[in-house]
Amino acid sequence: MKQVLVTGGMGFIGSHTVVSLMEAGFRPVIFDNLCNSSEDVLEGIARITGEKPLFIKGDVTSAADLKALFTGHNIDAVIHFAALKAVGESSEKPLEYYHNNIGGLICLLEAMQEHGVRNVVFSSSATVYGSAAHMPVDEDTPLPPAMSPYGSTKQMGERILFDASIFRSICLRYFNPIGAHPSGHIGELPLGVPNNLVPYVTQAAAGLRKSLTIFGEDYQTPDGTAVRDYLHVMDLAEAHVAALNRLQQVQDRPHWEVFNLGTGKPISVKTLVETFEQVNGVLVPRVMGPRRQGDVPELWANPGRAKEVLGWNAEHSLAAMLRDAWNWQQKL
Ligand code: NAD
Ligand code: UFG
């Protein structure tokens, strides 16, 4: 299994995964419509790996784009990152989210079927767990109705792959990926005002935002702020290499598996901000605010299955994640 199609490979997680794939000896083919990324990413990847990966501009909702891609390249496996991912926006534009995330997945699977490509790794999300009653969550935790159209597209995506049993598929439920490649050549590029905590923290520390608002200090958590499971994006990237290796082991059999990808360590918003300040020696101006609608008080992973089956675990510390995030912000 050598040539790997990476849909959404110009984005935050995709670009870091492309680096890991190249370093592991795979030949990634990036397919992205650049709706949330820029072509400069190729330069960043080349500075790290010494080689520009192949990039094809195209849309996963376009059967014609996919046909041209699969006809022109011998693809062994697909990692499907391409999706819209803003939880709040998905409630404002549900049809756009279903069209892109579900329509795109179906279009991609149809093209794969047509061209005899059977191996697929799917980007799912911890958001599928909603407000789970017991922490940490493992993969057998029953899934409640999704809390947003975005969450619903991830639950449905997993189910579509389960039903489409001609494929060998692995669904990866990412918890909260943060940080950047330690070189600072690639990282997260949020457009406009960041929704996510860490890009907001780095922009507030850099003086680009007046202050960070901490959403809620009255949760039933040790310090009152919400708790998540943050993992380094390079650890997450490596998990995709492990998933491809796993698919290689189960060749010639139908297959569907799901894995949590997190550190298993609960971190509060307050702890994260204070650690950022200590590690980087900068202040993060901040104010306390009300809870953000739709946020769960706490969510962290039991990552045991990924360790046992994929041989993967997250290695970077919170300090390393926050140092790399700040390094990237300073180079922007
Ligand atoms: P991102 O927006 O940085 O990357 C997604 C990439 O997909 C972008 O480059 C975008 O241009 C491309 N894309 C979107 N729609 C496309 C289409 N129709 N055709 C071709 N390209 C398209 O997002 P990310 O943070 O790298 O997330 C990658 C995946 O991981 C997504 O599926 C997302 O839902 C999932 N995920 C992300 C997080 C997170 O916190 N970042 C958490 C859980 C799951
Ligand atoms: N937060 C703040 N201030 C901010 C931004 C965030 O206090 O300016 C808080 C949030 O309230 C939350 C925590 O920081 O308690 C983390 O928020 P993020 O937006 O960074 O991450 P979420 O856990 O809300 O959501 C992320 C992804 C989703 C994905 C989910 C899976 O954005 O796409 O993880 O758990 F579905």
Image (cartoon, rainbow, N blue to C red):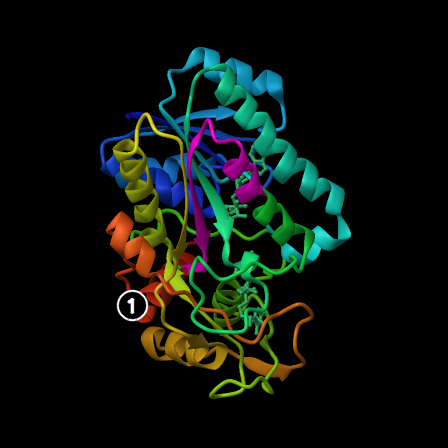
Relative to residue 194, is residue 166 drawn left or right? left
> Who is closer to the viewer here, 32 or 128?
128
Residue occupying the point 50% across, 58% down: 126
> Who is closer to the viewer here, 136 or 206?
136
User: Residue 83's x, y, as percent?
Assistant: 57, 41
Residue 303 visible in this rendered orientation of the protein = yes
Residue occupying the point 32% across, 71% down: 319
* Residue positioned most to the top: 71
Residue occupying the point 52% across, 14% down: 68
Quadrant occupied by the N terminus: top left
Label 1 lies in ligand 2 vicinity (Cβ under 8 Å): no
The three-letter amino acid code for the residue at tag 1 is Ser
Q: Quadrant of residue 29?
A: top left
Residue 58 visible in this rendered orientation of the protein = no
Magenta residue span? 157-178
Residue with the mark numbered 1 = 317
Find out whether residue 263 is within the magenta segment. Answer: no
> Who is closer to the viewer here, 32 or 75?
75
User: Residue 286's x, y, as percent?
Assistant: 56, 80
User: Residue 46's x, y, as percent?
Assistant: 32, 35
User: Residue 92's x, y, as percent?
Assistant: 76, 53
Find out whether residue 162 is within the magenta segment. Answer: yes
